[in-house]
Amino acid sequence: MIRRQPSLITIASEETICFLTLSTDGCFQTLASLPLEDFLEGGAKAADLPRSALQSVNRLLVVPDYWMGSRFDEFQARNKSVITAFIERKLKLEQPALTQAVDFYDYAVIQDQDHRQQLYTFYLQEEIAYRLYRRLETLGIGPLCITTPAQVWQAKLGDRVEDFSSKGVGLIHLIEADCFLYFFFMGQFLFSRNIQIPDTGGDASQIYDLLNYEINQSFYLYSQKTKSAVDSLFMLAPDASAVDQLTELLGREVKGMPALQTETGIADEAMVFPSCQEFTDLDLTRRGEHCLSYRPLKNELSWRPVQWAGIAVGLFLAVLLTVESGALYFWLGSVDRQMTELTSTAVDPPELVLQDISQALDEITRELERPSGSGTLMRTLLAMPDEVSVRKISLDVSGTPVLEMEAVIDADHPDAFKATLTVFLNQLNQRFNLKPNALREKDVIIQLDRSEGDGRRPVYQINFGFEIS
Amino acid sequence: MKTRLGKKWLIVGVIWGVVLAMTGWNTLLVNQVQSRRQELGTLRMDLNFLQSKQTGIQEVHRQQFRLTHPVKSFGLGFLVVENDLKRLSWDFGLQQMQVEADDITQDAQSVSISILAAGPVPAIVGWIAAVEDAHPYLVIERMDISYDKRNRTSRLQAVFNYRYILAERTG
């Protein structure tokens, strides 16, 4: 079984770092809560963290809003490499002290109200943030994403507020002892403020007066930064009447925040992070663009789909090839069995039998090609005209078959001899099929012997030989 | 995390290595199966051929068998051959038949036999034809037929190659 690694969420404040895990019932459980400085200095050793935390995948690190800086730049290009080169150059130029910022930034390309392309860059701007990342990385739980409460709210508002990405939005998050003000421009986080609520002894009007003042200050700051006003102002407070009170004091509409799902909110132990109190497991586990990753890690993570595709396709092919291999072995075995069955029925191997037959046929053919002694004699005798008498016939078939012959021709005069010789040679050529190397008169040795006969009539002796094909 | 990603690349590499190795192995197996199937097809064709041509094959072997004289010893075989040749010479009216064998060597399976005889040419031709027909293991290597004018007869001087095989059982 492949066991999915548990997810770890890390929340850090100026003083504390807290490690949360999501239990099977969907609730967060605190695994450890440590003093941040101790943790960074190594005072809190790896042993202080539960084994389960060290074996988890740290999916998200939530850091205070002010650890993250941001900027808007008018920028026309859309090419990724051009944009990253521009951002890195800007960061080096304008934040020369933040040498590591080039590894901890992300960006979004947006269109402003005048349809001009804006480049929104956000980056870690506190040295402590880099130290925290390195420390977590050393422990083997380097976070995949780094975000801030403001960016989590950005994601939540983006889901709930109509035209969030095209207008200025403010959020007042009032809790017992703190009030957080978040301001967003064109769907991107602009700045936030944390207002400590003083103890007024039950007089709420003092609190609202303070908030009125601080919010107006923030409106002014907002208009200075964006050259525009806040279009919508939302409020999330434990007391519903606070919305009306502030609407009256500010002289503009303050909308109550739509209902939030808080049943799976972070554990009570994490209440040291008041800005995160309203966050649910969904807020902290969703994958969005409202967080940044360590750039080298992000580059590597971008290969993860390729890795999974490689593993999946590779395993699929391996399974297919295994099945194919099994089938091939089965066929091979089947063919071998059939061959064994067939060869076991035969007395001798067929190839040996065929070889024997081939040799026998060769031998028989060789014998048939040899000229027969009687046949050669018969053909010679049948080719002889009556005027020809044999003196000697020699047949040698030890090498190339050769027939040699001595004979006499009974003729009254040379013309008759010549005619008889021509007939004889023609007959021999025909009967021995000597056409390619036909016997001719020039091949015959002719001798005239007057010692034989009555002395007046000559005896023509002929002597010749030829190859029998 | 970087280590995990590195391990994943390793896993990808190992899996694809296995895939490549199995592809090569399966290619070999496919070739092997094809080769064996061809062998099986050839074997089937050979067996079918041998079964369907059984009579012809037997005839080929019979013909081949006739080209060699199975004998228990060369002496016994030569005696038979000499006897047969002389008997045939009487049948064809040849005279003065002499049959002589050359020296044989160990393991020799053929011996030259010299023959001398006298008689009319047609008788000589008939005798040679009868020998070739009845004794295929006697093959003419050389022959001379000359006419003896004084005795008015023809003389045959021939060398036959006698092919024999030593066998315990002879037909």
Image: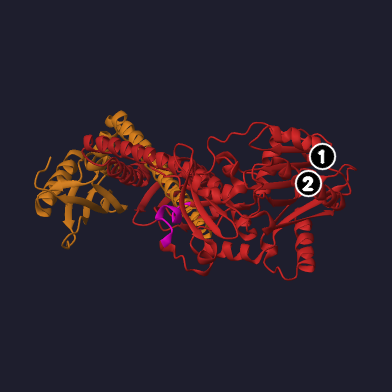
Give the residue drawn at x 77%, y 35%: A254
Q: Which mark is residue A137?
A: none
Which quarter of the rendering shows the N terminus of chain A?
top left
Q: Say which amino acid is labelled 2.
A: Ile
Give the residue drawn at x 57%, y 39%: A282
Chain drawn in orange: B
Q: Tell me if mark 1 has few (under 14), some (14-19) or many (20+) residues whose alpha carbon lies within 10 angstroms of its own.
A: some
**Residue B149 appears left or right of A466:** left
Tell me where residue A326 sits by quadrant.
top left
Q: Secondary structure at mark 1?
A: helix
Q: Earlier in the sequence, mark 1 or mark 2?
A: 2
Find residue B54 and report its horizontal and vertical position in percent: 27, 31
B131 or A28: nearer the eye? A28
Residue A53 lies in the magenta stretch: yes
Chain drawn in red: A
**Residue B10 appears left or right of A180:** left
B93 or A2: nearer the eye? A2
A372 or B12: nearer the eye? B12
Q: Say which amino acid is labelled 1.
A: Leu
Where are the magenta residues, as a range? A48-56
Query: Contact (CB < 8 A) between labels 1 and 2?
Result: yes
Give the residue drawn at x 82%, y 39%: A250
Pointer 1: what residue? A250
Pointer 2: what residue? A215
Which chain letter matches label 1? A
Find residue A294 and report its horizontal and vertical position in percent: 63, 58
Find residue A16 and report its horizontal and vertical position in percent: 54, 58
Which chain letter matches label 2? A
Q: CA distance from mark 1 to mark 2?
A: 8 Å
Q: Secondary structure at mark 2?
A: helix
